[in-house]
Amino acid sequence: MEVWKAFKLKNFQVLFILVLVMLLSGTIFYVTQEGLSWIDALYFCIATLSTVGHPSIEPQTTLGKVFTMIYIIAGTGLFIGLIGYIAYALTKQPENKKNN
């Protein structure tokens, strides 16, 4: 299965949309509450969800810290699920090749 075929899977579509919503909501939060630029906020969200992290950007307010804790717990699972579907699509062999 090619990677693009993963987009046809309903579960992948749902996870993809949820990850986009997480990225958008996190970016908006960090721009409005923490005063980050749009690009820094998006970068921080992607680094956080991918568990890479970013040492020079961190929440400064109590609300920001609480939001980040919830964001990490909720978002990391979604992001890992999405990556799992992509990995599945990359490694799955087509049925006709598998049976030969």
Image: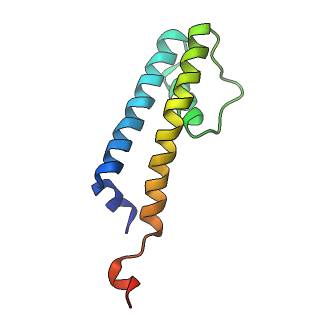
Quadrant assignment, res 44 = top right
Horizontal side of residue 23 vs 94, given as left or right:
right
Q: How is the image coloured?
A: rainbow
User: Can you say whether 61 is above or below 84 in the image?
Assistant: above
Q: Picture coordinates of residue 12 (x, y %)?
A: 35, 50
Quadrant assignment, res 61 = top right
Residue located at (41% from left, 27% from top): 24
Q: Picture coordinates of residue 71 (x, y %)?
A: 52, 26
Residue located at (44% from left, 19% from top): 28
User: Can you say whether 57 is above or below 18 in the image?
Assistant: above
Q: Residue furthest right?
A: 55
Q: Nearer the viewer, residue 84 or 30?
A: 84
Residue located at (65% from left, 11% from top): 60
Q: Residue furthest bottom?
A: 100
**Quadrant where the C terminus lies?**
bottom left
Residue located at (39% from left, 61% from top): 3
User: Can you say whether 81 is above or below 29 in the image?
Assistant: below
Q: How many numbered discs, if any?
A: 0
**Quadrant where the N terminus lies?**
bottom left
User: Can you say whether 58 is above or below 77 in the image?
Assistant: above
